[in-house]
Amino acid sequence: MDNSTLPTLQPPTASIFTTLLSNGPSYLTAHPVLLVLAVILLLLATTRYLSSRSTPPRKSSNGSPSPIPAVSYTLPLLGHLPAMAYDAAAFTRNLRDIYRSSGAYSLNFGGTVHNIIFAPALATSMLNQPTANAEAETVFKSLMGRVFGWPIVAESEGYDAFLAPLNALYVNFSSKEPLDAMVGRTAERVRAMIGEFVTGNESQVDQTLWERFANAEVKRDAKGEEVVEVDLLELVRDWCARAANASIIGSDFVNNFPEFWKDLYEMDRGFLLLATGLPRWLPIPPLTRAHLARKRMLDSLELFERAVDKHGDGEDAGAEWRELDDVGPVVKGRLELYRKYGISMRARAATELALMWAANANSNSLVFWMLERVYADKALLALLRREIAPYARPAQSTSDFGMPELPRIEVLDVEGICSSCPLLKSCYIECLRVDTASWSLKIVKEDFVLAPRDKEAQRWMLRKGEFAHVAHDLHNTDPNVFEHPDVWKPDRHVKYDEDGKVVGADFGSMRPYGGGGHMCKGRQFAYKECMMFVAAIIAMWDIDPVGGGEWKMPKHKKATGVYNTSSPTRVWVKRRTLP
């Protein structure tokens, strides 16, 4: 594509064109509609021409840094915003193919320059830039206020002082010993809860909370066997939340606020609208619901913070807060920081809300996509059950009266699942490739040269005030990197030695957790919980489409990281017949 080539504007008719030439301004004055049309066409053509001229050569001839190639646009002021709003995925992927040799391109959003980086070498360089060149803290601070409700205006200085020690705390508690403790406690809850993934109880009074949220109904299949029909997305997300979050925020909070996770997913649906800073009173239903859900969650978390504060002073926090000792090390460790920096209760609540969102919004939805993919392929399901058998072993015992008890997970070896099940790990990575669309954003603070390690490669100049986006999904869906990128292939990431023996599975050139100083701090916990959740569920339960027909994969719906879906996700669940 030659970005300096201008489109030829054809006149509506030859007769109008001739008339305009002969009569000039008098004709346009007599026909104001044509005058407006002519002005608009001239403005669009001029905008297109000027934006095309701003496009630099793809690669400098002498190896000196050049600005990242700019994509021409037609609409002044708006730039490429209409194209992004119409179909961002198709638009950005098409540009990736056009600017493949550059590894990046720049777009104009309302007069601001946004550099879209997709080549792995450039992405790695961008993610590892020092904060003096490019930083994400400004973006995070904005999100903390607009999305999570931190009182930025009143406590801006406190936030700035609090941020560095808070990040250091995250690093400390993602080390082996605290991580192992959190994973171990989560595994205990999985073993206790997996037998009630669905209960088969017809009355909602007797159902679990996750069954109620999933609108569970007892049905009979074609063989006359009892099955439970549920919304799989709602069932999985809520079950995972209750299994994992006690190890983070404590069992008291999980038990005292059973509606919290429902509100969390409601807020997540309006995340992007909240991030714009739009006020609550605008008549946009998802925005209104997100504001209301956030307020309820902040109120709940503020009650929790007051209880933790009292407990930290050795005071009685109240009858509903008797198990605060089991609050996870990350949350418990922040109390000293809150006090040291004078962080208000509302700001503390906003900090915990951000943690709860980060721990749940993406990983729990990813478990749903893994289950959708695995159960859709019965041959794959059989292979995975064989692979996990030594590490996720169900058992059924009999009571003292000779009656069979409900099946349970006798062995749940998380380390074995994560280190010795390469096919399951490959499925996890493949879902991160196909079922997520994450970008990493930084603001350029000073002019700097973006260069890959290859000294012969083209270097690019980024200017102060520009934005830099590492578009992970553009790499993950690149047909030059992944054969048939739109196809979910379970063993795509399995690695073999020279003798053809499986040696593991890895991410290759994928960077699903970002990189540099802002790499996801909870990535190891997220990986281990996803692997154990999926292993436990497929070891214990059979899942089929409603009616036992063909499995229809839900359609993706754009979200903040892992895709959501608006497609029906009703399925039949029943206990697996153990071998």
Image: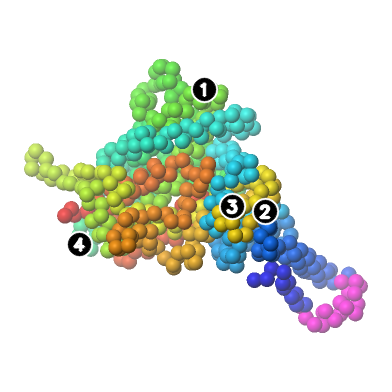
- Front tag of 1 and 3: 3
Using the rendered image of the protein, determine whether residue 231 is visible from the camera's viewpoint.
no
Q: Which label's residue is closer to the chain start, 3 or 4?
A: 4
Q: Nearer the viewer, residue 465 or 532?
A: 465
Percent x, y for residue 154? Answer: 63, 29
Residue type marked 3 = His
Residue 292 shown in magenta:
no
Q: Residue at x 19, y 54 (%)?
A: 577
Task: Give the magenta range.
Answer: 12-28
Q: Main secondary structure of the magenta part?
A: helix
Q: Which residue is mark 4?
A: 223
Q: Which label's residue is closer to the chain start, 1 or 2?
A: 1
- Front tag of 1 and 2: 2
Q: Which residue is mark 2?
A: 461
- Front tag of 1 and 4: 1
Disc 1 on helix, strand or loop?
A: helix
Q: Which residue is mark 3?
A: 469
Local packing at callout 4 (Cα closer than 10 Å; few below 14, some 14-19, many 20+) is few
Residue 194 left/right relative to 90: left
Residue type marked 4 = Lys
Disc 3 on helix, strand or loop?
A: strand
Q: Which residue is mark 1?
A: 339
From mark 3 to mark 2, how far is it between C-alphas?
A: 15 Å
The image shows residue 1, relative to residue 312, as above or below, that is below
Using the rendered image of the protein, determine whether residue 341 is visible from the camera's viewpoint.
yes
Local packing at callout 2 (Cα closer than 10 Å; few below 14, some 14-19, many 20+) is some
From mark 3 to mark 4, how far is it between C-alphas?
A: 53 Å
From mark 1 to mark 4, how far is it between C-alphas?
A: 62 Å
The image shows residue 339, relative to residue 184, as above or below, that is above
